[in-house]
């Protein structure tokens, strides 16, 4: 890593994160922040500035993945989480965070897990180099819900402490307070079944509106957001009527749930790239994948693109999220697959870039990130090529800066 007190970045092109493109710009950085965005012709640079030439590069705001899980897992076998030492999983997760950063994703939001809160601290204090982490800590769900571990006895699930199981508004309120006590940046809840949980159905609702409201009230009173895993439409509606801030997945949206998303201005994080993962897994199942998981994935494949494009065409606010957590096809470092898949299924490339930058930043509540403008934090990513002409250019990362520090530079 190279530190400069003051420097100027000179890419061929710039995307500001909000829909504006500039040719031959100059971006001036001092310390952690962007202090000016101007044209090269009007720039006056003294000898105290270091110049970074980025020929052939489109400069973007640091990209954001709004849905990951730092699990430290490398397979789809449910037993891995039980038999793998936590210390090993933490080391793997630290490497995963670094992979995300080097792929241009300077910020990621961990949507449920015990590792991310400590990983966030280690990154912030400089112990490890990795993406900025927004972490929920342990997720909240009903007994038997999506983040319950269905194949273990209930008392063992409580001992492992991977989730906060609760039933009824008062238990849910206390669970929210525990999550906040743990240091959660936001709270993650489950209002439907899911693909990765054995004994429930993605289309079936979980938690009640009253239970959701109790969690949301506790979070909002201290300025924290609530994100809900909700795959079936009924679970989506329960979450929205309960007051959550974002819907994660939304595989089976209907007209009513889309209308509610629009009316309430709630973010939708579709994790659409998983449709491609699910297709590949059906063709060639990886070792250790349970039959029930393959069956659920097959049920979702047809509906995921339809829900996404319906929400997009209706004008729902969308942010990128991969739901990657470590195993093959869901490995860290490939987060550009989400905006790429969004474009494949009908999103305009500019809107996909917005979903990965300013929209994602707003979804996470990060007012300092997501765009290239004066006063914003200097999270900057350079790619070879034009991602509007070819969204796959997002994989050609040759420059990464996080908080004014050059992390990676592969171009003169």
Image: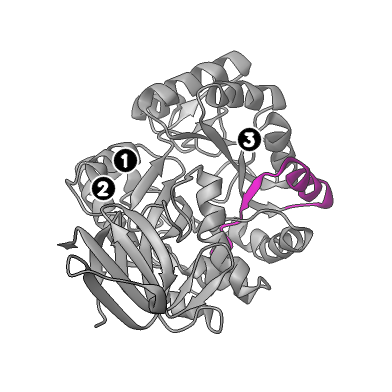
In the rendered image, the vertical position of residue 357 relative to residue 258, given as above or below: below
Picture coordinates of residue 264, whole percent (x, y): 73, 40
Disc 3 designates what residue?
244
Q: Quadrant of the N terminus?
A: bottom left
The residue tagged with tag 3: helix, strand or loop?
Answer: loop
Residue 153 position by quadrant: top left
Determine which residue is flagged by label 2: 89
Q: In which quarter of the image is residue 179?
A: top left
Name the spot of residue 71 as percent of width and height, x first. 35, 48
Is 211 situated above or below 204? above
Q: Please, which residue is most extreme toward the right here?
A: 255
Up/down of 52 relative to 34, above or below: below
First in sequence: mark 3 vs mark 2: 2
Q: Is residue 345 left or right of residue 278?
A: right
User: Between 333 and 159, which is closer to the camera in this rendering?
Assistant: 333
Q: Quadrant of the C terminus?
A: bottom left
User: Measured along the vertical axis of the image, is residue 338 above or below residue 221?
Assistant: below
Q: Give the magenta part as a residue range.
A: 253-273
The CA span between labels 2 and 1 is 8 Å
Q: In this view, does 327 lie to the left or right of 237?
A: left
Label 2: state its secondary structure.
helix
Cα distance in 3D space between marks 1 and 3: 24 Å
């Amino acid at each position: 890593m190279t530190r400069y007190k003051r420097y100027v970045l000179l890419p061929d092109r710039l995307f500001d994160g909000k829909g504006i493109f500039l040719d031959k710009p100059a971006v001036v950085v001092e310390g952690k922040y962007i202090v000016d965005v101007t044209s090269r012709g009007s720039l006056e640079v003294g000898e105290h500035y270091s110049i970074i030439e980025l020929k052939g590069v489109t400069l973007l705001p640091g990209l954001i993945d709004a849905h990951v899980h730092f699990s430290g897992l490398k397979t789809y076998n449910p037993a891995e989480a039980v038999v793998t030492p936590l210390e090993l999983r933490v080391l793997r997760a630290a490497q995963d965070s670094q992979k995300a950063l080097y792929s241009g994703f300077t910020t990621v939001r961990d949507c449920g897990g015990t590792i991310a809160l400590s990983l966030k601290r280690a990154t912030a204090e400089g112990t490890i180099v990795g993406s900025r982490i927004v972490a929920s800590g342990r997720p909240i769900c009903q007994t038997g819900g999506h983040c319950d571990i269905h194949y273990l006895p209930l008392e063992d699930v409580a001992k492992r402490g991977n989730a906060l199981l609760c039933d009824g508004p008062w238990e849910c309120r206390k669970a929210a307070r525990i999550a906040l006590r743990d240091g959660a940046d936001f709270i993650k809840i489950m209002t439907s079944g899911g693909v990765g949980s054995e004994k429930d159905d993605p289309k079936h609702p979980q938690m009640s509106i009253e239970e959701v409201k109790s969690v949301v009230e506790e979070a909002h009173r201290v300025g924290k957001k609530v994100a809900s895993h909700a795959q079936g439409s009924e679970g989506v509606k329960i979450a929205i009527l309960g007051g959550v801030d974002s819907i994660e997945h939304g595989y089976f949206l209907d007209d009513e749930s889309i209308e509610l998303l629009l009316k309430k201005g709630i973010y939708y994080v579709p994790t659409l790239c998983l449709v491609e993962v699910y297709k590949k897994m059906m063709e060639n199942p990886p070792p250790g994948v349970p039959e029930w998981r393959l069956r659920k994935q097959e049920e979702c494949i047809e509906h995921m693109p339809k829900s996404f494009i319906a929400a997009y065409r209706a004008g729902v606010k969308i942010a990128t999220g991969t739901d990657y957590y470590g195993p093959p096809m869901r490995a860290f470092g490939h987060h550009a697959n989400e905006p790429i898949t969004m474009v494949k299924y009908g999103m305009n490339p500019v809107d996909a870039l917005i979903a990965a930058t300013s929209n994602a930043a707003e979804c996470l509540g990060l007012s300092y990130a997501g765009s290239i403008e004066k006063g914003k934090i200097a999270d900057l990513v350079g790619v070879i090529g034009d991602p509007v002409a070819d969204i796959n250019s997002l994989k050609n990362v040759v420059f990464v800066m996080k908080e004014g520090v050059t992390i990676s530079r592969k171009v003169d």
